[in-house]
Image (tube, rainbow, N blue to C red):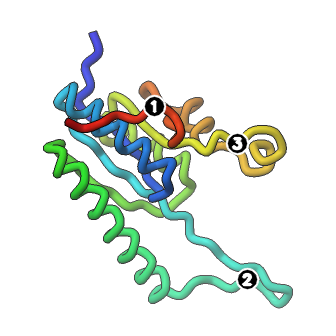
Amino acid sequence: MIDLRRILVPIDFSAHSTSALDTAVEFARRFHAEIHLLHVHQLPSYVYPDGIFPLTPELISDVEKKIALELERSAIRVRAAEVECTTKLVIGVTFLEIVAYARECDADLIVMGTHGRSGLAHALLGSVAEKVLRKAPCPVLTVRPEGHSFVHP
């Protein structure tokens, strides 16, 4: 028997993660589960010939405020479908933070988008979804935007 209580949805606001969120909402509705939306932000630093240019605290704060607004917009969509939703923003290495939060919130399922890269692009860029699949403490469902979509009644 499948018992889904908590579904983790890592979201980066792309079409891929939006499609995954739609799928997760449908699962949550059918299983009366709650959704945990997680955005992992990796702080970039810029390397120049004269050294590394770190981001200022003000710029980081501004970016985090914008991300928090996007997270809340996504949460509003989930709640409009009558699904309980929690949001979290963390800074770190994406796949590590997804796996850590899955453990922290005791997720029963991770639903995440994937770009479906292959060949050289996959070799050079790696795959967050693949790393999560290998390390996750629960099942992982990957969703491509051009895949199956659910229609909400």
Quarter of the image holding residue 25?
top left
Residue at point 55% right, 46% down? 95
At label 2, the amino acid type is Ile
- Label 2 secondary element: strand
Single out the mark in the foreground, 3 or 1: 1
Give the position of the N terminus as an image quadrant.
top left
**Circle 3 sits on which residue?**
117
* Label 1 crowd (10 A; few <14 / some 14-19 / many >=20): few
State the mark number for residue 119: none
* Spot occupied by residue 72 in the image (x, y as percentages of width and height): 27, 63
**Circle 2 sits on which residue?**
52
**Circle 1 sits on which residue?**
148
Single out the mark in the foreground, 2 or 1: 1
Single out the mark in the foreground, 3 or 2: 3
At label 3, the amino acid type is Arg
Residue at point 50% right, 56% down? 14
Quarter of the image holding residue 90?
bottom left
* Spot occupied by residue 74 in the image (x, y as percentages of width and height): 31, 57
Give the position of the C terminus as an image quadrant.
top left
Q: Earlier in the sequence, mark 3 or mark 2?
A: 2
Residue at point 51% right, 48% down? 16
Q: Are marks 3 and 1 in contact (CB under 8 Å)?
A: no
At label 1, the amino acid type is His
Q: How many marks?
A: 3
- In the image: residue 123, left or right of residue 15: right
